[in-house]
């Protein structure tokens, strides 16, 4: 098994990555080093800035990830502001903004960035299309999971096990791409 350091404070992300990468021969070790999530227009930019910050103090290979929920009827909001919005208006606030709105389409996007000392970082993306439910459903997962029904499913992410969520999720797709990239690098 190869070890991958995952720079994050989010245990939910670590659980998902551990489950996904276990089958691919990697063990994930969480490092909660913290890095500033800069105000930026894209997830890629946030991830790139995160890489530069962590590289300055952590001199081993690591990965980090930035994700966001982009809602069609809200012109992509909360998007890069997903974290802030989650901790301010939260899920009830999102439901209020969408009250009476017929178009419930949304997409989750994930950007994984992998860094090795002295090498150019690898950046990959994954997305999962779906709909915002009319009410919160499910106790699993984290963040916006109780509101998001991926395309092709009836349950919200909040009603799914990690294995089920990984069959659809933006993060699982990005991780698969990252592993392909890492395998070609080594
Ligand atoms: P970040 O990648 O930790 O900055 O995530 C931004 C916000 O989106 C946080 O509030 C997360 O809880 C939320 N988020 C990211 N990925 C997911 C997911 O897979 N499900 C639900 N919420 C998520």
Image (tube, rainbow, N blue to C red):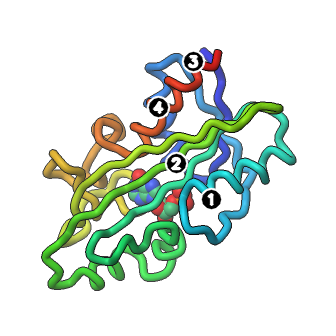
Residue at 13 percent across and 76 percent down: it is: 102
Q: Report how far apart the C-alphas of labels 3 and 1 lie in the structure.
A: 25 Å
In the picture of the structure, the residue carrying the numbered disc 2 is 111
Crowding near the residue tagged with mark 2, few <14, some 14–19, many ≥20 C-alpha atoms within 10 Å: many
Image-based side of 146 in relation to 65, left or right: left
**Circle 3: element type:** helix
Task: Classify mark 1: helix, strand or loop.
Answer: helix
Going from the N terminus, do you reach mark 4 or mark 2 first?
A: 2
Label 1 CB-ligand 1 distance < 8 A: yes
Dot placed on the residue nearer the N-terminal end, 1 or 2: 1
Q: Residues within 10 Å of mark 1 (few under 14, many from 20)?
A: many
Q: Which residue is mark 1?
A: 46
Question: Residue at image x 35%, y 82%?
Answer: 93
- Mark 4 element type: helix
Q: CA distance from mark 4 to mark 2?
A: 11 Å
Query: Which tag, 4 or 3, sits closer to the chain's start?
Result: 4
What residue does disc 3 label? 184
Task: Tell me residue 90's x, y (percent).
Answer: 41, 76
């Amino acid at each position: 098994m190869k070890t991958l350091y995952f720079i994050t404070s989010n245990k939910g992300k670590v659980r998902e990555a551990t489950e996904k990468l276990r089958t691919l021969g990697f063990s994930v070790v969480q490092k909660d080093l913290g890095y500033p999530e800069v105000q930026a227009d894209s997830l890629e930019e946030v991830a790139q800035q995160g890489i530069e910050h962590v590289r300055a103090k952590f001199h081993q290979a690591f990965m980090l990830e930035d994700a966001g929920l982009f809602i069609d009827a809200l012109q992509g909001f909360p998007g890069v502001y997903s974290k802030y919005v989650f901790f301010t208006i939260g899920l009830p606030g999102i439901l209020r903004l969408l009250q009476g709105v017929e178009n419930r389409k949304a997409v989750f996007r994930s950007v994984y960035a992998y860094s090795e000392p002295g090498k150019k970082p690898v950046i990959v993306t994954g997305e999962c299309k779906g709909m915002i439910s009319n009410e919160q459903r499910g106790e699993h997962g984290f963040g916006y999971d109780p509101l998001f029904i991926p395309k092709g499913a009836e349950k919200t992410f909040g009603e799914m096990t990690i294995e089920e969520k990984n069959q659809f999720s933006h993060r699982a797709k990005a991780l698969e791409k990252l592993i392909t990239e890492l395998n070609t690098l080594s």
